[in-house]
Amino acid sequence: MENPFDPGYYREHELRQMGFAEVGDDVRISRNCTILGLPNIRIGSRVRIDGYCTLVAPGNGYLRIGSFVFVGGYSLLSAGAGIDLEDFVIVSQGCRIYSRNDDYSGEHLCGHNVPERFAGITSAPVRLRRHVMLGTGTVVFPGVEIGEGTAVGAQSLVTRGLPPWGIFAGCPVRRLKDRSRRVLELEQEVRKELGK
C-alpha cells in the first residue's frame, strides 16, 4: 500500500514525457506540486523541488532552473515575465518570486480577469545568480536581479537588485555584511567529483 502522507517525487524519466522544454539528470519534483506552462520551463540537473510548490510560466513567460538547485516546499515561482535561477541557487520554504505584479495605487484595475489595457501591471524578469540563497518566506518583486553569492535572510522583502556576495535581510532588505566566497571552491570540488 502506498503511504498517503508521502506522495513521492516525479523523476527525470517521467518528467521528460510531460512536455517540459528541458529536463536534466537527477531531477526530483514532488508529485503534489502545481506546474503550469510546461513548454516554457527548462530544468538543469540535480534539482529538487519539494511539495506544494507552484510554478507558473504562462504565455510568453519562462522559467529556467539551473543545476544543483533546491526549491523548498510551499514556494511560488510566478514567471509570467520570466525567472532565471542559476546553478546552486537555494529557494527556501515558502518563498514567493514574482515577475509580474499589479498596481495597488487605485489608478488601475487589478486581477487576472481584467483586460490588460485597464491594468497597470509591472512586468520584468527576475534573475537569481549562482549561489544565491533566499531564506524562508522571502518575497522577490519583478525586475530584481540578485548578484552572485548573495544570501537573503528569512522573511525579507526584495524590491530592488542586490549586489554580489552580500548578506541582506529585512523588509525592505538592507545589507548586513559580506558573504564568504568559499562556496566557489566547493563548487569546483563537487563538479570534479561528479564529472559535471
Image (tube, grey):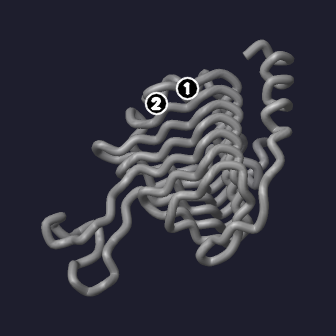
Q: Position of residue 55 (x, y in %)?
A: 50, 50
Q: Which residue is label 1 attached to?
A: 23
As drawn, 105 above or below 169: below
- Tell me if 115 is positioned left or right of 29 in this view: left
Q: Residue at x 70, y 69 (%)?
A: 169
Q: Which residue is label 2 attached to?
A: 20
Q: Nearer the viewer, residue 111 or 194?
A: 194
Q: Where is residue 167 in the image (x, y as percent from the top left)?
A: 74, 60
As drawn, 51 above or below 191: below
Q: Which of 11 and 39 is in front in this view?
A: 39
Which structural element holds mark 1?
strand
Residue 143 location, quadrant: bottom left
The amino acid type found where label 1 is placed reads: Val
The C terminus lies in quadrant: top right
Q: Residue at x 34, y 47 (%)?
A: 58
Crowding near pointer 1: few (<14 within 10 Å), some, many (20+)?
Answer: many
Residue 183 location, quadrant: top right
Are circles 2 and 1 on residues that touch, CB within 8 Å?
yes
Q: Nearer the viewer, residue 41 or 187?
A: 187
The amino acid type found where label 2 is placed reads: Phe
- Tell me if 39 is positioned left or right of 10 in this view: left
Q: Where is residue 109 in the image (x, y as percent from the top left)?
A: 22, 78
